[in-house]
Amino acid sequence: MKITLGKASVPLLRTDGTLAAAPLFFLCGILLSVSPLPGLILSMTAALLYLSFLFYYVPRLYRYSLVRLESGFLFWRSGVLFRFTTVLRPEHILTVSVSQTPLQRMFGLCTLTVQPVGSPVRIRQLSRRDALLLKERIAEARHG
Amino acid sequence: MDKRPHPVSVWHYFSRFFFLLAVPVIQAILREPFSKVAWGNLPGLLLVAGLSFFQYDTSGYGIGPRDGGAGEKRPYLRLKSGLFYRRQKILPADCLTSAMIRSTPLLGVFGASQLILDTPAADSRKPSADLYLNRAMLSGWWRRMKRDVHYRYRASQARIFLMAASWSNPASGLVLVGILLDRTGKILGEELSRSLYAAANQSARLVALGLPPAVAFLGWLLAFGWFAAFVTQFFCYGSFSAGKTPRGILIERGILFRSRQYLKDRAVRAVSVRQTLMMRVLRLSSVYLHTIGSGREKDDRSLLLAAVSQEELEFHLNRIYPMDAECLLTGRHERKISPPRAALKSFLLLPVCHLLAVVILFLLCRAFAPFFAPLALFLLVFPLYHTALHIAAWKESFLAVSGKNLVACGYIRDQLFTAVIPRESLQCLVIRQNPFQRASGRCSLRLCIGTERGACFTLRHFSRKEAEALLSP
C-alpha cells in the first residue's frame, strides 16, 4: 500500500509559508523605509527564499514524501534538503491517532501520529481518506 | 484504605516562591524583630506554606488487588493528589519496570527516602510515581530483594575514580557550579554570590604567583570546572554494585546521596559498551543498560559495569545481563558493514571546522589582543581530541547482524560505543541524508530502541545501499 501526501498539501504548505513570511516582509518594509540599501538587500533575500520555498521546496516535498505499508513494515520518507526514511514494524506501534489543525481542516488534510515506545512519528498533510485507510491497515497489520 | 506519604513530602509541594519569600522574612525578623515591615511579609509566607500543607493533606497512596477480568485479581498502586484539581493515578504492578530508592542526608535526618517508580508510559520529564516514604520500610523491602541476589558485581573505588576522571570535563563542571551559584544567589541574596565571586577572584590572584592574572584565572576556572565535575561524578557513582536476581537487576550507587534501583529483566532493551579515548588507551570500558520506562536521570542510572577490562567484561556480563550478548564478547558476526574508506573526509569535517575556529580565534587575538593569543592555543586540545575520536570512530564503526541481535558501533559525544540491540527491541529505524551524503550515497542511521527521549544509537556515514541491504526484511 502506497500513499502520497494529499493534493491539497501543496496549497496548505504555501499558505503556511506565506503566513510565516508575512512578518518578515513587514520588517523588510520598515527597514526599507529607514535604511534603503540594507533594506533592499534583505528584502531581495527574503523574496528569493520565499519564492524558492513556494516553487522549489513545496513541489519537491510533495513529490518525494511517501508512506508505504508493505512486507510487514511501515515506511515513511520525506524531506527535501535533509531527507529521511523512517521504518517501523506495525506490531511495535502502541497507538495511532489522526488529528487536524484548523488550516488542515480547511484543506481537508490531517496528521497521522503513530506512537511506538519512545518518541512518536508524525506523518503530516495526508488526505483524510488516506489517513483513515492507513490507520485501519496499521490496525490490521498489528493484529497479524 | 489510603495511606499518607511521609510528612517530608510537604517539602515537595513548597514552591520556589516559598524559599524566595522565607529567607528575606527570616533575615528581616532576625535583624529587626520589632519592625512592622519585617512581620508584614509573614502572612504571604504563611499562605504559601498553608497551601503546601493542604496539598500534602489531600495526597495519599494505596495498594490493593483490582479485578483484572475473569475473576483474576491484579495488584496495583493508587496515588491521589491535588488540592483544587483532584487527580488519581493507578499503576498496575505488572506494568512497573523499575523502582528506585533515593536517600539523601537531609531526608535521612527526617527518616524518609524517596521512592521513584517507572513504567513504559513515563515521560522524559517525570517518572510515573514519586513518593516520600518511611526509610526503614523501604530499606526493609530492599533487603528482602537482596536476599534473592545470586550474582553480585562490585566496582572498586579506584575504578570509579578512574572512570569519573576520564568522564569529567571543565565545561560540564562549570555549568554545574554556575547553576548552583545562580540558584543559591537567588535564594540567599546577591550578597552571597558576590562574596563567592570575590573569593574566586582572590584565589585567582593567589594562584597567579607571577603569572598574568587572566592566564591564572582561566587555568583556575578550567581546573575548578574539571574538579567540580569529577567530584560530582565520583559521589554519584561511588560504592557502585550490581546484583542479579531471578527476575531483575539490583543496582546500588552513590556516596552520601545513595540510589538503589531495581530493574525488571523485561525492561532491558539493549546493552552498550562505552569508552573514552583515555579508557581505550588503558583498555578499559564501561557497560550500560538501556531500559524502558524512565525518569529524567535515566542516563545516570543505567551504568552496569564501571571501567572493566575485557576479561572482567566477559566474566561479569554473562552473569548479569539477562539477554544474549555473546556477539559483543566474541566479535563474530554473520553480516557486517562499515563506513567506506572515503568517508574519512566526512568524519573529519566537524573536527576540522573546530580546529579552524580555534585558529581564527588565535589570529583574531594576535591582531586585536596579543595578550590573549597564547590562551587561544590552549583551546587546540579540544579539536585535537575531537579529531582523534573521529578517526577512531571511522576505523571502528560498524553495523552487524548477529543471530537475533543487531550490533552497532559508533560514537556519541566524546565516547565510542558498541551496542547489542535485540531485533525485537528496535522500535524504529531512521535513515537520514544531508545534501552532501545524498551526493555520495551515504547516510546516517538512527536505531531507536524506544527508551526515554526516543533514545537511539546513531551511526554516521554508512553507505545507504549497504545499510538497506543489511537491514532489509
Image (spheres, coloured by chain):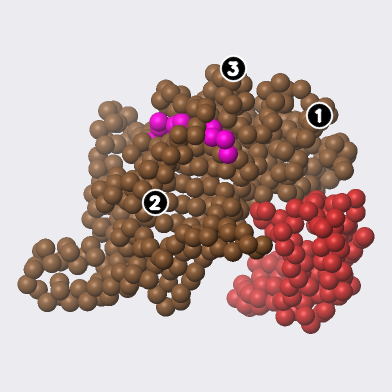
Q: Which residue is mark 3?
A: B311
Up the image or down, A139 lies above or below B261; here it is below
Does the segment drawn in magenta span residue B471? Answer: no
- Identified at 28% across, 73% down, the residue is B50
Using the image, tell me which numbered label, if any, was put on residue B114.
2
Residues behind callouts 1 and 3 on a single chain: yes
> Picture quarter containing residue B445?
top right
Position in image of residue B116 (x %, y %)? 46, 52
Mark 1 vs mark 3, CA separation in Å: 24 Å
Does the segment drawn in magenta span residue B235? Answer: yes
Q: Which chain is brown?
A: B
Mark 2 vs mark 1, CA separation in Å: 45 Å
Position of residue B269 in the picture relative to residue B163 (left or right): right
**Crowding near pointer 3: few (<14 within 10 Å), some, many (20+)?**
few
Label 1 vs 3, first from the N-terminus:
3
Q: Which residue is mark 1?
A: B336
Q: Amino acid at mark 3?
A: Glu
Position in image of residue A138 (x %, y %)? 83, 61
Viewer-nearest residue: B171 or A112: A112
Q: Amino acid at mark 1?
A: Lys
Label 2 vs 1, first from the N-terminus:
2
For the N terminus of chain B, give its image quadrant: bottom left
Residues behind callouts 2 and 3 on a single chain: yes
Q: Chain of mark 1?
A: B
Residue B173 appearing in the image:
no
